[in-house]
């Protein structure tokens, strides 16, 4: 619990800091990109090709910086949670096109869900976002292709099976497993820290897993990582089962009373 609090405070501070910096940076980058673009257009022909290449490379760098800044802005503007009752099997099925488009062709994607998954309560957009983040990390870990398996099943955790802060109880476990490069135990220890990344500048923000971590905690869930260097990684997101009496209307926006009124 202390660890969770520390992480939440870090996230809060980082959110405020990045929001401010990213906003200013975004404005400055717009000026830089606009001006390089103007120069490239005005001196269209007959210019020194080396100067042109230099400008093009500056533009590319600035555009990469802008995309990074956009992601930082999106991070600091995290939407508040809007929890709903979710059928995880349906949510995953609905993501299949998006996943195919985001993952390279050399990676086989498998989605495996238990029949009769328990309902969970979470923000569906943020859950999709979390799964997409995990899938993109899996993709990045398999530059030469491989397979990505996303599975969901019901799990009952007894007191013996639970560790740091996980309550015993009923959960739906969503696993994202890859057969990629894996991580050292040093890396695993740092992955939830905001800005921790091993990816090259402009590719990684180091915010993906800290966002997923924040989402899991805010949803009353948990996240676990199992990774072996050279073999692969499995990230498991545990979301608490929604109790039956709390809502019989799965995915329903309206109660019968509202619907008839
Ligand atoms: P980013 O993807 O922007 O680097 P993340 O917070 O999502 O930010 O991930 C942090 C780091 O954790 C990555 O840079 C990578 O080193 C490691 N990582 C995350 N997921 C995986 C994975 N599936 N396989 C190997 N390493 C991973």
Image (cartoon, rainbow, N blue to C red):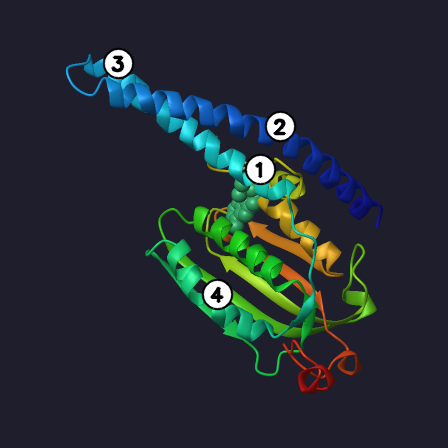
Residue situated in front as seen by the camera: 80 or 119: 80
Q: What element carries label 3?
A: helix
Residue 29, how many percent across, how many down? Answer: 48, 26
Q: Is residue 208 left or right of residue 50?
A: right
- The circle drawn on residue 72 is 1
Residue at image mark 3: 51
Label 1 vs 3, first from the N-terminus: 3
Q: In which quarter of the image is the C terminus?
A: bottom right
Number of other residues with Cα within 10 Å of mark 4, as a class: few under 14, some 14 to 19, many 20 or more: some
Q: Are marks 1 and 3 in contact (CB under 8 Å)?
A: no
Number of other residues with Cα within 10 Å of mark 1, as a class: few under 14, some 14 to 19, many 20 or more: many
Residue at image mark 2: 21
Q: Distance between the residues labelled 3 and 4?
A: 45 Å
The residue at label 4 has a CB less than 8 Å from ligand 1: no
* Relative to 95, residue 3 above or below: above
Q: Are marks 1 and 2 in contact (CB under 8 Å)?
A: yes
Residue 197, how many percent across, how many down? Answer: 56, 36
Residue 51 appearing in the image? yes
* Relative to 124, residue 67 above or below: above
Q: What element carries label 2?
A: helix
- The circle drawn on residue 95 is 4
Label 2 vs 4, first from the N-terminus: 2
């Amino acid at each position: 619990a202390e660890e969770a609090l520390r992480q939440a405070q870090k996230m809060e501070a980082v959110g405020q800091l990045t929001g401010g910096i990213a906003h200013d940076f975004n404005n400055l980058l717009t000026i830089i990109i606009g001006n390089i673009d103007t120069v490239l257009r005005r001196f269209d022909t007959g210019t020194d090709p080396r100067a042109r290449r230099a400008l093009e490379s500056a533009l590319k760098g600035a555009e990469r910086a802008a995309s990074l800044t956009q992601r930082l802005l999106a991070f600091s503007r995290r939407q508040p949670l809007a929890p709903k009752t979710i059928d995880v099997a349906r949510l995953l099925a609905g993501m299949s096109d998006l996943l195919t488009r985001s993952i390279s062709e050399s990676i086989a994607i498998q989605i495996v869900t238990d029949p009769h998954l328990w309902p969970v309560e979470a923000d569906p957009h943020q859950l999709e976002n979390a799964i997409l983040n995990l899938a993109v990390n899996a993709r990045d870990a398999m530059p030469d292709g491989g397979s990505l398996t996303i599975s969901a099943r019901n799990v009952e955790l007894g007191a013996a099976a639970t560790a740091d802060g996980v309550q015993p109880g009923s959960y739906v476990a969503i696993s994202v497993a890859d057969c990629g490069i894996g991580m050292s135990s040093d890396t695993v220890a740092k992955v939830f820290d905001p800005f921790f990344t091993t990816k090259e500048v402009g590719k990684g923000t180091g915010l993906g897993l800290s966002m997923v971590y924040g989402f899991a905690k805010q949803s009353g869930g948990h996240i676990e990582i199992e990774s072996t260097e050279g073999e692969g990684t499995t990230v498991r997101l545990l979301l608490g089962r929604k109790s039956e009496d709390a809502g019989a209307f799965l995915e329903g926006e309206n109660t019968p009373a509202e619907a008839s009124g």
